[in-house]
Image (tube, rainbow, N blue to C red):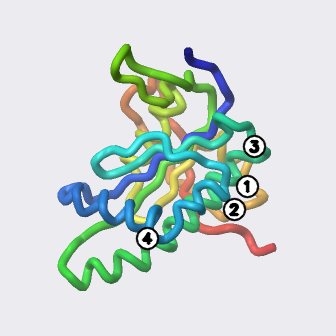
Amino acid sequence: MTTRVADTVLIVCHANTARSVMAHMLLERMLVVRGVGDVRVCSGGVATWARDGMMIFFNDPTPVPNPQERAVRMALEMRDRVDELVRGWRKRGWELDFGVGIAQGYATIGAIGFEGRWDYGAIGTVTNLAARLCGEAQPGQILVPRRLYGTLEDLVEAAPVGELALKGFSRAVSVYNVTALKPA
């Protein structure tokens, strides 16, 4: 059974995927060894691991207030932690980087698959948008569409990236790069 829920989806990936096994190990170390609790503290849930990335849901299965704020705060914290780890990996000759795409909208969420092979996941335009933004993200960027930025502009500092033509979208998407939280 699937459900339809307003959801914030965070896709995390590496800009350099040539060594996807190492990228996966880096993400795993960052989230598992150094605090997968961070995901839970932000009320997110790791939904999908891929070769060089992951998808994290906010606002599902448990509704939370301000899921977009929680996703952005977590993405900024993850970027800072990855920066620490990347410096050490670069000293060993590994070029790994980190980019994020965040989108908010409706997705079909729940058990997806067939008998004998069920996964908990999400499908829909919002997941596609987050994945496409992640794919466009340069190292260290956290990309969000204009609509999501509009709900976050009092919280974050961001720079306009411009209009991006993304696969699967008939119109260009206006995109912002979230750089930091605004001083309190």
Disc number lying in front (1 or 4): 4
Q: Secondary structure at mark 3?
A: loop
- Name the residue at 37% across, 31% down: 167
Is there a contact, CB below 8 Å, between mark 4 and mark 3?
A: no
Label ID, residue 131:
none
Label ID, residue 64:
3
Q: Is residue 159 visible?
A: no
Q: Which residue is mark 2?
A: 156
| For residue 51, above or below residue 60 | below
Q: Disc 3 and disc 2: Cα gap in Å?
A: 20 Å
Q: Disc 3 and disc 1: Cα gap in Å?
A: 20 Å
**Category of crowding for the residue at label 3, using alpha-carbon neighbours closer than 10 angstroms: few (below 14), some (14–19), many (at least 20):** some
**Category of crowding for the residue at label 4, using alpha-carbon neighbours closer than 10 angstroms: few (below 14), some (14–19), many (at least 20):** many
The kind of residue tagged 3 is Val
Is there a contact, CB below 8 Å, between mark 1 and mark 2?
A: yes
The kind of residue tagged 2 is Val
- Name the residue at 37% across, 15% down: 114
Disc number lying in front (3 or 1): 3
Residue extending farthest to the front is 116
Of the numbered discs 1 and 4, the one sitting upstream in the chain is 4
Q: Disc 1 and disc 2: Cα gap in Å?
A: 5 Å
Task: Residue 183: give x, y in percent of width and height.
Answer: 76, 74
Label ID, residue 82:
4
Label ID, residue 153:
1
Task: Residue 168: give x, y in percent of width and height.
Answer: 40, 26
Image side of residue 31 versus residue 53, left or right: right
